[in-house]
């Protein structure tokens, strides 16, 4: 059986990070936001999400391969 808990947890964490960044960027112009820091954070969240998506895909492929061996 495939355990998607690890990649789903990572994807949820990346989504939370993106939502927090979006909230900071949506603040009124009177609040100072360091755009370069926020962009780096967005890039890190994007990379994390991509890695977790690839992990889920790999787990699925491994499970399918195992089923083919036993079938």
Image: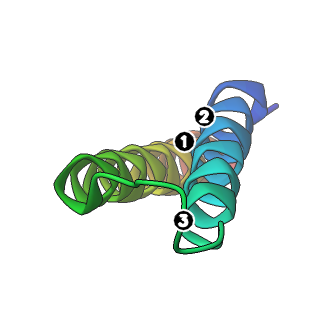
Q: CA distance from mark 1 to mark 3?
A: 47 Å
For the N terminus, the image quarter is: top right
Tell me the residue at 47%/53% (across/down): 49
Which residue is nearer to you in this view: 8 or 61? 8
Residue holding disc 1:
59
Q: How far across and down, in percent of the image, does residue 71 sit? A: 69, 50
Label 1: few (<14), some (14–19) or many (≥20) C-alpha neighbours in 10 Å = some
Q: Which mark is residue 30?
A: 3
Of label 1 and label 3, which has the lower sequence position? 3
Q: CA distance from mark 2 to mark 3?
A: 33 Å
Task: Mark 2 and mark 3 in contact? Answer it, CB < 8 Å.
Answer: no
Q: Which mark is residue 16?
A: none
Of label 2 and label 1, which has the lower sequence position? 2
Q: Is residue 29 above or below residue 22?
A: below
Residue 58 visible from this viewpoint: yes
Q: How far across and down, in percent of the image, does residue 30 sit? A: 54, 65
Which residue is nearer to you in this view: 51 or 13? 13
Single out the residue that lies furthest toward the front.
30
Tell me the residue at 27%/62% (across/down): 35
User: Which of the two discs, 2 and 1, sits closer to the camera?
Assistant: 2
Q: Secondary structure at mark 1?
A: helix
Q: How far across and down, in percent of the image, does residue 10 sit? A: 60, 34
Of label 2 and label 3, which has the lower sequence position? 2
User: How many numbered discs sit on the rendered protein?
Assistant: 3
Residue holding disc 2:
10
Q: Secondary structure at mark 2?
A: helix
Q: CA distance from mark 2 to mark 1?
A: 15 Å
Q: Is residue 13 above or below residue 46?
A: above
Q: Secondary structure at mark 3?
A: loop
């Amino acid at each position: 059986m495939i355990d998607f808990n690890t990649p789903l947890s990572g994807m949820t964490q990346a989504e939370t990070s993106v939502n927090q960044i979006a909230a900071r960027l949506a603040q009124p112009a009177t609040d100072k936001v360091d755009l370069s820091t926020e962009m780096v954070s967005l890039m890190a969240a994007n990379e994390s999400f991509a890695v977790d998506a690839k992990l889920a895909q790999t787990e699925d492929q491994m499970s399918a391969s195992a089923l083919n061996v036993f079938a």
